[in-house]
Image (cartoon, rainbow, N blue to C red):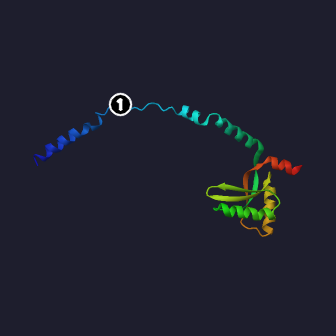
Amino acid sequence: MKFFIPILLASALFSQDSLFWFDMRLVRDPIPSTPKVLDGIYGTSQLKILDSLKIINKSTRTGYRVQVYETSSVEKANEILKKFKSILNDSLYVIFEAPLYKVHYGNFIKKDDAEELKKNLMKKGYKNIWVVKSRIDQNYLLRKDS
């Protein structure tokens, strides 16, 4: 026991200095030059992306559509789209929101118009359909009115 306590104290004293001998000045990395790399890769294409987003905002607006179907299979979504194109006379869209493909119908500014269409479709036997808020195509609305 007399030998055990001094050995324990000595090991505790010598083990404490392991963090203090390390010199952090030797480990510093140089500052990365990422802005130069990004400019070299993308160039002015970033500006084109921003311009396309502005064009989308000018040609679309917030509106409503009726969602008629959703599935996790793109093949099934395209099959349903073809089926509904032969039945319905307005525009149909396949929209991907992970993990589902959704088939939307129509372009409505007012929610009441979309609700009325939903009621008519439910009378015809369509089930599990609902009105969703969406970006609608203003150019389509202008072509439809003229």
Apparent side of residue 29 relative to residue 138 in the rendered image (left or right): left
Q: Residue 129, can we see it? A: no
Q: Amino acid at mark 1?
A: Leu
Looking at the image, the residue that sits furthest to the front is 40
Q: Nearer the viewer, residue 72 or 7?
A: 72
At which x and y percent is residue 77? 69, 62
At which x and y percent is residue 98? 62, 55
At which x and y percent is residue 20? 29, 34
Task: Report the residue at 64% width, 62% height from top.
Answer: 73
Tag 1, which secondary structure? Answer: helix
Give neighbour class at mark 1: few <14, some 14-19, many 20+ (Cα, 10 Å): few
Q: Nearer the viewer, residue 14 or 56?
A: 56
Task: Report the residue at 46% width, 31% height from top.
Answer: 31
Residue indicated by mark 1: 26
Q: Nearer the viewer, residue 118 or 92?
A: 92
Task: Report the residue at 51% width, 31% height from top.
Answer: 33
Q: Residue 5, can we see it? A: yes
Task: Report the residue at 19% width, 42% height from top.
Answer: 11
Q: Is residue 102 above or below residue 3?
A: below
Q: Is residue 20 above or below residue 115?
A: above
Looking at the image, the residue that sits furthest to the right is 146
Looking at the image, the residue that sits furthest to the left is 2
Looking at the image, the residue that sits furthest to the top is 25
Apparent side of residue 143 relative to residue 13 in the rendered image (left or right): right
Residue 16 position by quadrant: top left
Apparent side of residue 28 relative to residue 55 in the rendered image (left or right): left
At which x and y percent is residue 107? 79, 53
